[in-house]
Amino acid sequence: MTKQATHPFDDIRKLAQGLPTGDMDVGEQVTAKLAQSLSGLQPLGQLSAAIAWLARWQGTSTPAINKPLVSVFIGCHQVAGHVLDTDVVEGGKVRMASMAKGSAGVRGIAGSVSALFKVFDMGIEAPAADMRTAPSLSERDCAGAIAYGMEVVAENCDIIVLGNAGFGSATAAAGIARGLFGGAAGYWAGGDGETAARRIEAVEQAALTHKEILSDPLEVLRCFGGRDIAGMVGAILAARHQGIPVLLDGFTVCAAAAIVHALNPDALDHCLAAHKTTEPAHSALLERIDKKPLLNFGLGIGDGSGAALTIAVLRAAAAGCKTL
């Protein structure tokens, strides 16, 4: 009797099923409490649902944010050489230096809310292949990146922010969105100017190259995404299994979330869309994964800045819930 061959993605698919659901009773108790407070005047307004969500995943009727983590995933994509007409590795190094040396605004925001700050270097010096002509990653490399991203839960935090500062990641994310949901490349990779035109062209070409795999979410990830986006898929799955709530940031982060959603529509229940960026098609992607953004700061970057700002709002609202 021969042993049946297994593939690296088999375990990932299993992880997306049979997921913990959090403490539904606690969430409902907090919802009822806030609805009844002050004769139903909704003292926390639209934040009530977010606090009930936090209570559900923290498993307490008095949720709090005491140990937040802001995690930023950075990788490089060869397709950026075509879209941005620059050296991909050097571009990635600049992004990493901005995060590591503290000049990125998200670092200051993380510090202001007393959050741990961690940058995940997802192979800056080993860029994902050009998705226009080849799969971005092998199945083994993609599964390995997913596994590495799962390390985000090692800090034992009570809420996790996911941000992305990858070089070429927005193009890869547009490719993922086009692969999962169809539509015109310009819808997902739109914008003005020569750079946007090259991005649209790249997504169109990649969609043709990989048209045979579009029914499989993990194959879409492998062919269009890179290590940084795969890492965020792993982070989302690991956080769910550990019962840790997650704040999603911009378009690229939500592309990773869309992969998880395609594997299991219930797998994002522990995730909250922290805010809506001005990034092209971010709103459309949020609609596809059934997430309504909590806030709108008008930010045009998805590196975790908006979600980190949201920590302060949620922390204050949770404190307010305790006094009601």
Image: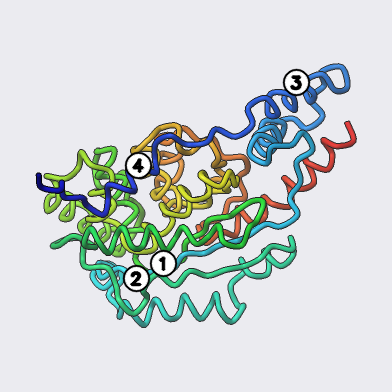
Q: Is residue 320 left or right of residue 180?
A: right
Disc 2 element: loop
- Dot 3 or dot 1: first in sequence order is 3
Real-space Cα distance between discs 4 and 1?
28 Å
- What residue did someone put label 3 on? 32
Mark 2 or mark 4, whichever is nearer to me: 4
Dot 3 or dot 2, earlier in sequence? 3
Q: Position of residue 282 (x, y in %)?
A: 44, 46
Q: Could you tell me if the residues under marks 1 and 2 are in contact, i.e. CB atoms within 8 Å?
A: yes
The residue mark sitting in front, 3 or 2, is 3
Quadrant holding the C terminus: top right
At mark 3, the secondary structure is helix
What is the spatial separation of the Cα atoms under label 1 and label 2, in whole angstroms?
Answer: 6 Å
Q: Residues within 10 Å of mark 4 (few under 14, many from 20)?
A: few
Viewer-side residue, 281 vs 265: 265
Of the numbered discs 2 and 4, the one sitting upstream in the chain is 4
Identify the residue position indicated by label 4 in the image. Answer: 14
Distance from disc 4 to disc 3, alpha carbons, whole Å, reads 35 Å
Q: Cα distance, mark 3 to mark 1?
A: 41 Å
Which amino acid does the dot numbered 4 rest on?
A: Lys
> Real-space Cα distance between discs 2 and 4?
28 Å
Q: Earlier in the sequence, mark 1 or mark 2?
A: 2
The reply to whether the C-beta atoms of the residues labelled 3 and 2 are less than 8 Å apart is no
Farthest-out residue, front: 1
Q: Quadrant of the N terminus?
A: top left
Identify residue for label 1.
Answer: 166
Q: How is the image coloured?
A: rainbow
Question: Foreground mark, 3 or 1?
Answer: 3
Badge 4 element: helix
* Disc 2 crowd, CA 10 A, few/some/many (<14, 14-19, 20+): many
Q: Amino acid at mark 3?
A: Ala
What amino acid does circle 1 point to?
Answer: Gly
